[in-house]
Image (cartoon, rainbow, N blue to C red):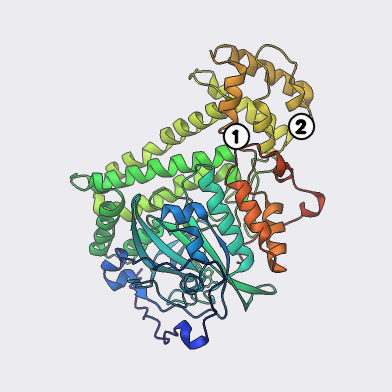
Amino acid sequence: MELINDARPDTRPFLPSEARGTKPDAPGAQKAALPRLENRFAELSPPFYSDVVATPLPDPYLIAVSEDTSRLLGLEPAALASQQWTEALCGNTRLPGSRPLAAVYSGHQFGVWAGQLGDGRALLLGDLATAGGRFELQLKGAGRTPYSRMGDGRAVLRSSIREYLCSEAMAALGIPTTRALALVGSDFAVLRESVETAAVVTRVAESFVRFGSFEHWYAAKDVDRLRILADYVISTSYAHLAQRADRYAALLAEITQRSATLVARWQAVGFCHGVLNTDNMSVIGLTLDYGPFGFLERFDLGFVCNHSDSEGRYAFAAQPGVVHWNLYCLAQALLPLIDSVDDAKAALAGFESAYEDAILLAMRAKLGLQNANETDAALIDSLYGLLEANHPDHTTFFRQLSKISRSDRENDAAITDHMIDREATSAWLDTYRERLKEESRSDELRRLAMDAVNPKYILRNYLAETAIRHAQARDYTEIARLAAVLSRPFDEQPESASYAEPAPEWALGLEVSCSS
Ligand code: AMP
Ligand code: MG
């Protein structure tokens, strides 16, 4: 199959915001020089991407800024409130030095080869050198690109709020993820199932290269470009491998490790990605492309967060297997460079042990166990059986578990009250208690350690929906409030305790699908 990219750069004229009448800066906004970007990815030649001019977004307004991500980039959050920044964060003006481009990639969607995809609505602006390394800035929803196919290149406010909130929430949970610097809205109408309005999220990551970026050149039988891309990824993200003779196999082995660790972290916190296609898999092990994601609320191994996933391919419990499957696609794509099926298989073989190590590590921490004991895997298995039979709220269950006393049943109601089968729950708690007796830590210290890994606050679907409904009525305060709560997911925050509540009745039928 030939997949040579003959897409032409978008030639629409660049419309500077001055021509459309820039609004004056909000009072109190600090005017600061915009940072200068470099263009590391653009140094690859144009077949890897197309130069694209962002489609102007009429009358943009700033909706949210992440203080954490601003600081990560060495930017003052208050400075981003200027109209100058707003225009830059939706693509109406260019940051100094920026060379906007859309990258090409291909991929397997729902297990089927989909051919060429690419950044259909994302524009890479360039990268920023910071004290913590180089970060790329990308606008999601800044207009059509040569890879937009039938799409309009836009993202709606609803899905942009979800991506903004979840990227930052995942980062606060300590899970590797792309970040969100800002969210800009506009009254510009976008047609989905109904008419909605457009928004742009500025995403930040060390790299946005996907498994599908490699699959693209493999499918095109272009080994030279496959090597150029692999060398680029090694030099930018895996520099310690650069001198190794077996560097491509080593690259696959490291991506395998990072992906296994990532999916273990998802399972431990109850995160369901929703669209684990190979084009949504980061080669540096980040959670990437937030769409119809969802956190487990009522525990259910078969939980499918994406309403469009009718077969449940990306169900919660299927995620580790799917990530492994995706790694096979990546391995296939890297095979011309690795040149040995055995070496590729050896690299992939690291998945199972890396996943098992990572999930055991995470689960021991969730259960407050400091020492490794060979009975732990069985204890965790029986816990999952119990959860599957009782369907408690996942997050509440683990948060409450720290209250169990290791000497008696006095506090057991903290858990049994949330379960249907109290007898089976008590039996499991007794086994757990026996295991706790093998630990030297006091109940009090264990409680502190457990509360530092079992979040109280996660981005429940109804919380996102509430913030979205307020925003659709032009009230953006709920986004800021929710983002603030989720930025400290392990803290008690008594004033925000209602944000830890399970979904109210009105939200039980909420559905999220790919249409965004
Ligand atoms: P996703 O399901 O969001 O990962 O997207 C899959 C592919 O469809 C990617 O190549 C996206 O860039 C593209 N895409 C999704 N939505 C749009 C849109 N509204 N306009 C253009 N391309 C889109
Ligand atoms: Mg995608």
Q: Which residue is under mark 2?
A: 418
Q: Is residue 119 left or right of residue 425?
A: left
Q: How many marks?
A: 2
Q: Is residue 312 visible?
A: no
Residue 234 in the image: above or below residue 80: above
Residue 97 in the image: above or below residue 21: above
| Closer to viewer: mark 2 or mark 1 | 1
Q: Residue 69: x percent and y percent?
A: 47, 54
Q: Which residue is under mark 1?
A: 454
Q: Is residue 46 left or right of residue 58?
A: left
Q: Residue 30: x percent and y percent?
A: 48, 66
Q: Is residue 463 left or right of residue 491?
A: right
Q: Of all residues shown, which one is farthest toward the right? A: 505
Q: Is residue 26 visible?
A: yes
Q: Residue 93: x percent and y percent?
A: 44, 77
- The structure residue drawn at horizontal position 29% and vertical position 65%, both measured from the top left corner, is 221
Label 1 element class? loop
Residue 40, quarter of the rendered image: bottom left
- The structure residue drawn at horizontal position 39% and vertical position 68%, both measured from the top left corner, is 33
Marks 2 and 1: CB-CB under 8 Å? no
Q: Is mark 2 within 8 Å of ligand 1?
A: no
Q: Nearer the viewer, residue 131 or 152?
A: 131
State which quarter of the image contains the C terminus. Answer: bottom right
State which quarter of the image contains the N terminus. Answer: bottom left
Q: Nearer the viewer, residue 329 or 428?
A: 428
